[in-house]
């Protein structure tokens, strides 16, 4: 059994997570050195653990009734940079590996700092130089002992800070954007309920996953392509046009069920009022967007799909009038949002706004779906469902596409008061915007 | 060994007067700060009972010595606290018996990680109630101890206490009463 020592970086020096114990307590607590001293971050840790507000029980549960006691070797002050270390420590505890205690000789040492949000994205933190400085002794100790030592930080500014600060030889630095990337790097990805999509399942480009087929055709040349954006803009001047997918695409999905309705695309032209239309370069062929249901193949389970590397059977979800056909949750491992740009490089931004209920993703949105990097061919964003779906959920999917990089306006599509203004702004800039509502029932 | 003849009549009355004066002087001297009081102003006792003051050594000294003062303190305490936990329920996890009062409950769970420690869990059934700041436990002789409560979350305050701590000793006494203030 691999023994993994997990250190949380603090400006006062690294704090080792010594032990995690499920207790018959009412609230999860962080204790110092196995004593009755409760650290002030306990309230935040309890929030981080609880289903609803946090991710630990969601990702690694279910657990017996109670809460966690987590022991650390040194105080951890305010802030949220402990979250990544705590998340990984819980993953270790839930895996076949073992959390190395103070008396154990670890096989692996990991050092982490980063915030973890509800979707398991890792956020940047501050005071990295100080944290690295106060950890020099730790690094020297374990590298001298020949124990593989890895530093996990948020990709981006934190990675740059590490590069500037410098590390002793032998320290491996892994920049990450999602917590699951750390689990994969450590080899314990299967410990998580929803965060452990096999890497190849994430890369569903045409070459790696030919079974995923576009079903949500989209025509845009010079016009604004909107599905149900009219609902958001409440402008009757938007004109709808529904286009069915080509027959060869429908036939090519390996295990498509008989289509109840053909996938549909709504194409509209922008309203002439209050929208400044900028001519986009014409597209050689239309990009397509498809919502896919992901189910296990015959004889397999969703666990095999999510943790065992078994490829899901995908089937497109028909769309009409900006509404996707409701999906039945039974046997449904997850969904996938696929954008196919065809042979030409284009930009795309994809956002999901929950209308009701809750959907667990825990998966990584492809970086190309942030609208900053052009791509050709297909990219897909797999979304996992929880093992138990107690109530229906409904979400609204926004996809923005264009020949130019998509700016900050797109980031307001995920919800909030700025959505309508963002839609108008994007339309005014000549981008294509598609919106679909989709409901998944238990 | 000394032997004293017991006075009688007018001599006895005079002796009583002299000793009374001595006692008054002693009282005046002890009432000065640092000397330890034998009596205390009701206002100071009330302030201590209601939590307006928490660290008054004179009050604590008087409470230690005077059963009558303790009884008065107890009455003030009961009138100023919002929650009382008088009853004992079945013991849990080998620890003290749980107690349940109107609108509140206190229970104990032995730690799996450190068996000498207990989780002391104070729960309010009315989560909207103003959260209490302190737990006060009084034994049958009206000796009371006050323990600050951590901030309540969702109507719950949780502490970790050693099984040999004062908190566990007081709460482990089945004749004791607990109050939330």
Image (cartoon, coloured by chain):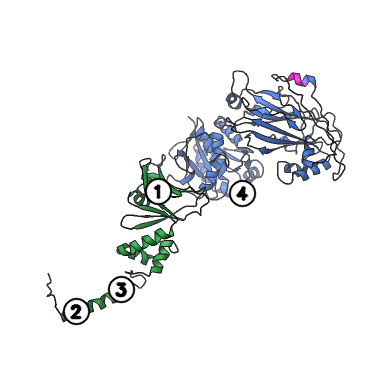
Chain for disc number 2: B
Chain for disc number 1: B
Give neighbour class at mark 3: few <14, some 14-19, many 20+ (Cα, 10 Å): some
**Cα–Cα gap, marks 3 and 4:** 61 Å
User: What percent of the width, then of the height, locates residue A289?
Assistant: 76, 30
Q: Which residue is mark 1?
A: B161
Q: Which residues are magenta?
A: A249-259
Chain for disc number 3: B
The residue drawn where x is 80% and y is 25% is A244
Using the rendered image of the protein, determine whether residue B170 is visible from the camera's viewpoint. Answer: yes
Give the foreground label among 1 and 3: 3
**Callouts 1 and 4 in the same chain:** no
Q: Which residue is mark 3?
A: B27
User: Does the magenta run of residues contain A272?
Assistant: no
User: What percent of the width, then of the height, locates residue A35?
Assistant: 42, 46
User: What percent of the width, then of the height, locates residue A318?
Assistant: 74, 26
**Cα–Cα gap, marks 3 and 2:** 21 Å
As displayed, is residue B5 above or below residue A298? below
Q: Residue furthest front?
A: B102
Please name whichever residue, B161 or A403, is drawn nearer the observer in this view of the structure: B161
Give neighbour class at mark 1: few <14, some 14-19, many 20+ (Cα, 10 Å): many
Task: Give the green chain's letter.
Answer: B
**Callouts 4 and 2 in the same chain:** no
């Amino acid at each position: 059994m691999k023994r993994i020592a997990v250190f949380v970086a603090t400006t006062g020096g690294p704090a080792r997570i010594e032990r995690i114990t499920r207790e018959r307590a009412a609230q999860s607590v962080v204790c110092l050195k196995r004593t009755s001293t409760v650290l002030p971050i306990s309230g935040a840790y309890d929030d981080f653990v609880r289903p609803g507000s946090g991710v630990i029980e969601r990702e690694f549960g279910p657990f017996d009734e109670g809460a966690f006691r987590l022991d650390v070797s040194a105080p951890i002050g305010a802030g949220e940079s402990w979250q990544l270390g705590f998340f990984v420590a819980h993953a270790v505890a839930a895996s076949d590996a073992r959390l190395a205690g103070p008396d154990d000789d670890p096989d692996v040492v990991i050092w982490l700092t980063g915030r973890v949000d509800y979707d398991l994205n890792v956020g940047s933190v501050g005071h990295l130089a100080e944290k690295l400085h106060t950890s020099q002794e730790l690094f020297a100790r374990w590298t001298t002992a020949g124990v593989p030592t890895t530093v996990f930080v948020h990709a981006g500014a934190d990675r740059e800070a590490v590069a500037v600060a410098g590390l002793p030889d032998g320290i491996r630095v892994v920049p990450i954007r999602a917590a699951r990337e750390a689990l994969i790097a450590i080899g314990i990805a299967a410990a998580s309920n929803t965060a452990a999509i096999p890497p190849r399942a994430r890369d569903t480009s045409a070459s790696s996953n030919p079974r995923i087929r576009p079903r949500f055709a989209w025509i845009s040349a010079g016009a604004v392509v909107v599905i149900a954006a009219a609902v958001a803009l409440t402008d009757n001047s938007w004109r709808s046009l529904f286009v069915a997918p080509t027959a060869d695409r429908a036939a090519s999905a390996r295990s498509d069920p008989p289509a109840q309705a053909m996938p549909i695309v709504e194409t509209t032209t922008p309203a002439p009022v209050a929208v400044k239309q900028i001519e986009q370069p014409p597209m050689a062929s239309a990009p397509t967007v498809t919502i896919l249901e992901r189910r296990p193949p015959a004889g397999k389970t969703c666990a095999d799909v999510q943790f065992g590397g078994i490829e899901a059977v995908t089937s497109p979800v028909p769309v009409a009038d900006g509404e996707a056909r409701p999906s039945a949750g039974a046997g449904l491992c997850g969904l996938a949002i696929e954008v196919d740009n065809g042979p030409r490089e284009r930009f795309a931004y994809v956002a999901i706004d929950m209308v009701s209920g809750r959907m667990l993703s825990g998966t990584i949105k492809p970086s190309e779906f942030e609208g900053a990097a052009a791509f050709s061919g297909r990219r897909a964003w797999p979304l996992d469902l929880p093992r138990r779906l107690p109530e229906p959920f409904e979400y609204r999917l926004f996809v923005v596409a264009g020949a130019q990089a998509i700016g900050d306006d797109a980031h307001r599509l995920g919800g909030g008061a700025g959505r309508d203004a963002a839609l108008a702004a994007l339309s005014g800039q000549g981008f294509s915007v598609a919106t679909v509502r989709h409901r998944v029932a238990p | 060994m000394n032997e004293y003849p017991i006075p009688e009549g007018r001599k006895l009355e005079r002796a009583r007067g002299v000793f009374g004066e001595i006692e008054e002087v002693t009282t005046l001297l002890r009432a000065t700060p640092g000397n330890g009081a034998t009596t205390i102003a009701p206002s100071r006792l009330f302030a201590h009972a209601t939590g307006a003051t928490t660290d008054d050594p004179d009050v604590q000294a008087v409470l230690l010595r005077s059963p009558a003062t303790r009884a008065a303190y107890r009455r003030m305490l009961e009138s100023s606290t919002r929650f009382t936990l008088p009853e004992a329920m079945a013991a849990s996890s080998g620890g003290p018996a749980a107690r349940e009062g109107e609108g509140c409950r206190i229970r104990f769970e032995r730690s799996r990680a450190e068996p000498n420690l207990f989780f002391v869990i104070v729960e309010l059934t009315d989560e909207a109630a103003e959260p209490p700041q302190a737990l006060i436990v009084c034994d049958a002789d009206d000796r009371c101890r006050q323990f600050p409560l951590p901030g309540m979350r969702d109507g719950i305050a949780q502490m970790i206490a050693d099984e040999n701590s004062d908190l566990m000793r007081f709460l482990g006494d089945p004749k004791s009463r607990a109050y939330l203030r």
